Image (cartoon, rainbow, N blue to C red):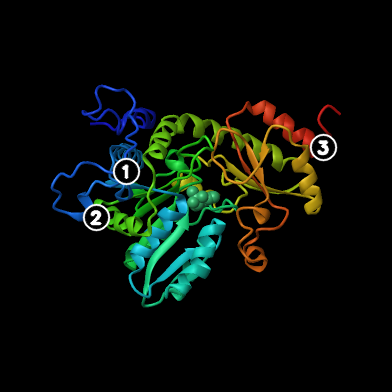
């Protein structure tokens, strides 16, 4: 049977299990444990930290369906999901090859925390496959990358990353947060594990923290054991909110992608803008690979203005519609300087090494009117105060 449209699956997948008294929306099962049912396996003991409530099952079924994986798990945050996936795949004394420009928290985990646990990580440039072989070690077990990287919007050679991981028997994990399943589906593309900070696009309303992993039944079951022992479980009420938010994912992301494309073009043509980072721009790094792998270029972009940090801050203060705040993927447009927020924990020399300057501004485009946003950007770039 032909696969249904993503919008149809976002609305209906995982909904209306038979035992919910006909309720159209999955009710919140706000209970920490369930009556004992003579479970034979530890994993079947029905307890809140095990992540096996009807709310977990419903949202996980929706996630697996829309990402076209066999199974999914939800976690207490994006970091809980990625840490569980990486630690589970590393075994004892393992080594990761990770993309050099990553979300700040992941970067610090890879370059500082793993080492304290007896593992190690080497950073790679995802645009240069010819350099990866030399970074391999006998204990390399994981390849970790981001579809569209935070905050530089890099798209690597995704086909080559999949092929390299397969050729060397590495578990390939890709953080698909920026693209969302609307713009990229890692599992049919060949990655082993797709990871999300659901705090962002999947929920879309900036009111919860959650993470997800999608992959084969076997890998997800094994990663769930690690997650449960790390204590990274998510509450049923958060599952319910995430499930609700996901129903409008494609509507939101299509609109955000369209507006981001228009904004990227506008910024590229403005004399006060030094550079624009957006995979949809033909001049951008990774444009060809984005065309090859993605369905759309996403709602995130980066740009640098002429001038120093104080001028960047003054520009931010002149904006009226976007909120100046970290995070991304919600219905409201957000602006932030990654060097002062998401990547503040990354040492300045490591930021400089990959091109995360102090003046770089990251924009998460919301669903507001496109012309309202363009007008606001133009006014703030031209140096005019509101009502001036
Ligand atoms: N991955 C990316 C690309 C992110 O931007 C973030 C957070 O900003 C994370 C992972 C971590 O997600 P969370 O904050 O849900 O733990």
Label drawn at residue 218? 2
- Residue at image location 39% in from the left, 29% down from the top: 7
Where residue 220 sits: x, y (%)?
29, 53
Q: Nearer the viewer, mark 1 or mark 2?
A: 1
Where residue 144 sits: x, y (%)?
44, 61
Using the numbered discs, state the Cα–Cα distance from disc 1 to disc 3 in whole angstroms: 55 Å
Instruction: State yes or no: discs 2 and 3 in contact (Cβ < 8 Å).
Output: no
Q: Which residue is mark 1?
A: 32
Mark 3: give few (<14), some (14-19) or many (20+) Cα within 10 Å: some
Q: Is residue 46 above or below residue 30?
A: below
Q: Which residue is mark 3?
A: 382
Q: Quadrant of the C terminus?
A: top right
Tag 1, which secondary structure? loop
Please tell me which of labels 1 and 2 falls first in the chain. 1
Q: Quadrant of the N terminus?
A: top left
Tag 3, which secondary structure? loop
Label drawn at residue 257? none
- Residue at image location 25% in from the left, 27% down from the top: 20
Q: Would residue 209 appear left or right of 370 to someone viewing this image? A: left
Tag 2, which secondary structure? helix
Mark yes or no: residue 148 visible. no
Using the numbered discs, state the Cα–Cα distance from disc 1 to disc 2 in whole angstroms: 26 Å
Mark 2: give few (<14), some (14-19) or many (20+) Cα within 10 Å: few
Where residue 154 sits: x, y (%)?
56, 54
Please tell me which of labels 1 and 3 falls first in the chain. 1
Using the numbered discs, state the Cα–Cα distance from disc 2 to disc 3 in whole angstroms: 55 Å
């Amino acid at each position: 049977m032909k696969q249904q449209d993503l919008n149809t699956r976002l609305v209906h997948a995982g909904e209306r299990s038979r035992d919910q008294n006909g309720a159209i929306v999955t009710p919140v099962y706000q209970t920490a444990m369930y009556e004992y049912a003579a479970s034979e396996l530890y994993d079947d003991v029905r307890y809140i930290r095990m992540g096996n409530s009807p709310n977990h099952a419903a949202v996980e079924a929706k996630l697996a369906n829309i990402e076209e994986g066999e199974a999914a798990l939800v976690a207490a945050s994006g970091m809980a999901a990625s840490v569980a996936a990486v630690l589970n795949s590393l075994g004892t004394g393992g080594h990761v090859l990770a993309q050099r420009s990553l979300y700040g928290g992941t970067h610090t985990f890879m370059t500082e925390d793993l080492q304290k646990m007896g593992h190690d990580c080497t950073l790679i440039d995802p645009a240069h496959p010819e350099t990866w072989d030399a970074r391999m070690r006998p204990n390399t077990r994981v390849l970790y990358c981001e579809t569209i990287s935070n905050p530089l919007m890099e798209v690597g050679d995704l086909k080559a990353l999949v092929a390299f991981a397969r050729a060397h028997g590495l578990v390939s994990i890709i953080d698909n947060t920026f693209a969302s399943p609307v713009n990229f589906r890692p599992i049919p593309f060949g990655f082993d594990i797709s990871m999300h900070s659901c705090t962002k696009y999947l929920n879309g309303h900036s009111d919860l923290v959650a993470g997800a992993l999608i992959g084969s039944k076997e890998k997800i079951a094994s990663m769930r054991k690690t997650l449960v022992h790390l204590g990274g479980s998510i509450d049923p009420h958060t599952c319910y909110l995430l499930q609700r938010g996901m129903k409008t994912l494609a509507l939101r992301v299509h609109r955000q992608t369209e507006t981001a494309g228009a904004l990227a073009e506008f910024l590229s043509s403005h004399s006060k803008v030094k550079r624009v980072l957006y995979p949809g721009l033909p001049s951008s790094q990774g444009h060809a690979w984005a065309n090859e792998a993605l369905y759309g270029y996403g709602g995130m972009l980066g740009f640098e203005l002429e001038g120093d940090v104080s001028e960047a801050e003054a520009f931010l203060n002149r904006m009226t519609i976007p909120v100046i705040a970290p995070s991304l993927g919600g219905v409201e447009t957000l602006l932030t300087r990654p060097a002062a927020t998401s990547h503040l924990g990354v040492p300045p020399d490591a930021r400089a090494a990959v091109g995360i300057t102090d003046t770089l501004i990251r924009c998460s485009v919301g669903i507001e009117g496109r012309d309202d946003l363009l007008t606001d950007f133009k006014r703030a770039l031209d140096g005019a105060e509101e009502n001036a």
